[in-house]
DNA sequence: CGGCGTCGATGACGCCCCGTCAGGATTTGA
DNA sequence: TCAAATCCTGACGGGGCGTCATCGACGCCG
């Protein structure tokens, strides 16, 4: 038998791609995440059901539980995913920054742009009046918090700024970013620059007026 | 038969107290709210179950649904309750205030004190790592937002302050209050005065630096 | 008092979602 | 080609959900 016209059902892989098991695993994980994003988007966090997500993936119910333990866990995975994608952007801003003002401006702008971009993907067709799900403290989200805090610390120290309550400052900045960002998303046209100017103005102006611990 | 020693089983009410029907209704409503507070406190919002609340009240399951349609609705009722109790305090601060600075200081302080007081009642025994439930936008909560916004508007106008983006400002102030308040609750001793100084300092300092729309 | 109409408390019920697990299909490595 | 490993499958027991027929208690009036 010549070897010209013969192809085995599955030709041997010459590359170092992971095996089929590994590939379906990541495919499943991704399918679940995608389905979850859509379901949460349409039904809201409370309204969503593990079964809804499962149905959308076409997998068996048991399979879901091979990947995530619960609705909370998928949701946290989505949040983690967002945080993981945002972190590098934050790091870039830190590298670029020359002082606190420029870091804050860059980070804030990066966040609002990120938010606006996510917005499209995320809130596909939210029924009116649905509260959007609470951002939970997953490992990656916590890491972002810590990273902001540390960046603040370093950059403030670098420019010999007087000491402040860093925990409060970090919390306040993130709070302003979140809430102003939220309001920004409701406005048309969506003005990330305006939101940035507001948030940065408030915090930079307030910084010198903070009590010294 | 003399009328001295005779009391009918239920002596007639001379007062204008509502009838028994009405009284058990308010009692039930209150019992459900109390039970809900405790259950949410112990199990967290996600972990709590309508059945848990029902069990704690001792009522029948059907009775619960005569008062609230769902877990969400009881929770919103609790939030509403908090907002309803906070609103007068806010109003008092508005009356007392002579300018934006004094209003902000008073309101912030009132909020942190309120928060600290609620804390005792609310987070009875939260298991570690539980995220506390999202504050939802119930009618009363929305009303508080609107009231803050209007108070800001009036007091800023009164002192001929330059115009600002009131929506952003309100959102930012509430955000700072919430988040700094949250951090405050985790500290021992709980320092409402310190938190107030921080939040007020940040916002008052930032106000003049805001972009003019 | 006594009788009647109404209100709302009751809890069993059917429905659906939950998370599990024994069985089976598919991939892997030899 | 075969055995072992992997993990997908879907039926199942458990339990929470919201409803509704029933009934006891309340209020009202003669």
Image: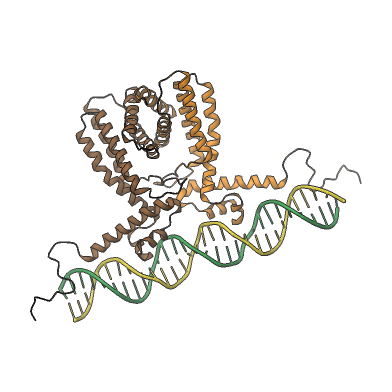
Chain colours: A brown, B orange, C green, D yellow
- Left or right relative to B94: residue A83: left
Q: Residue at x 36, y 37 (%)?
A: A189
Q: Residue at x 22, y 26 (%)?
A: A159
Residue A27 visible in the displayed image: yes
- Left or right relative to A198: residue A161: left
Q: Quadrant of residue A163?
A: top left
Q: Quadrant of residue A161?
A: top left
Give the image location of residue B60, x and y in percent. 61, 56
Q: Quadrant of the C terminus of chain B?
A: top left
Q: Residue furthest right?
A: B1
Nearest to the observer: residue A134 or residue B37: A134
Give the image location of residue A117, x and y in percent. 31, 44
Residue A73 visible in the displayed image: no
Q: How many numbered marks, from 0 up?
A: 0
- Left or right relative to A47: residue A212: left
- Left or right relative to C11: residue B73: left
Q: Residue at x 42, y 51 (%)?
A: A45
Nearest to the observer: residue A93 or residue B166: B166
Give the image location of residue B142, x and y in percent. 50, 37
Image height check: is A167 above or below B42? above
Q: Residue at x 54, y 47 (%)?
A: B74
Give the image location of residue B175, x and y in percent. 41, 34
């Amino acid at each position: 038998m010549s070897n010209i016209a013969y192809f085995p059902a599955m030709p041997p892989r010459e590359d170092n791609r992971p095996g089929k098991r590994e590939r379906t695993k990541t495919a499943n994980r991704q399918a679940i995440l995608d389905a979850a994003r859509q379901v949460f988007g349409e039904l809201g966090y409370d309204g969503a059901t593990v079964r809804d997500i499962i149905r959308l993936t076409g997998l068996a119910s048991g399979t879901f539980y091979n990947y995530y333990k619960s609705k909370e866990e998928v949701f946290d995975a989505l949040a983690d995913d967002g945080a993981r994608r945002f972190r590098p952007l934050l790091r870039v801003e830190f590298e670029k920054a020359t002082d606190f003002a420029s870091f804050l401006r860059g980070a804030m702008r990066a966040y609002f742009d990120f938010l606006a971009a996510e917005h499209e993907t995320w809130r596909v067709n939210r029924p009116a009046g649905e509260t959007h799900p609470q951002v939970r403290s997953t490992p990656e989200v916590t890491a972002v918090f810590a990273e902001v805090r540390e960046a603040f610390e370093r950059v403030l120290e670098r420019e010999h700024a007087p000491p402040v309550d860093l925990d409060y400052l970090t919390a306040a900045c993130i709070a302003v970013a979140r809430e102003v960002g939220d309001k920004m998303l409701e406005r048309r046209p969506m003005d990330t620059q305006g939101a940035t100017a507001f948030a940065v103005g408030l915090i930079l102006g307030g910084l010198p007026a903070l009590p010294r611990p």
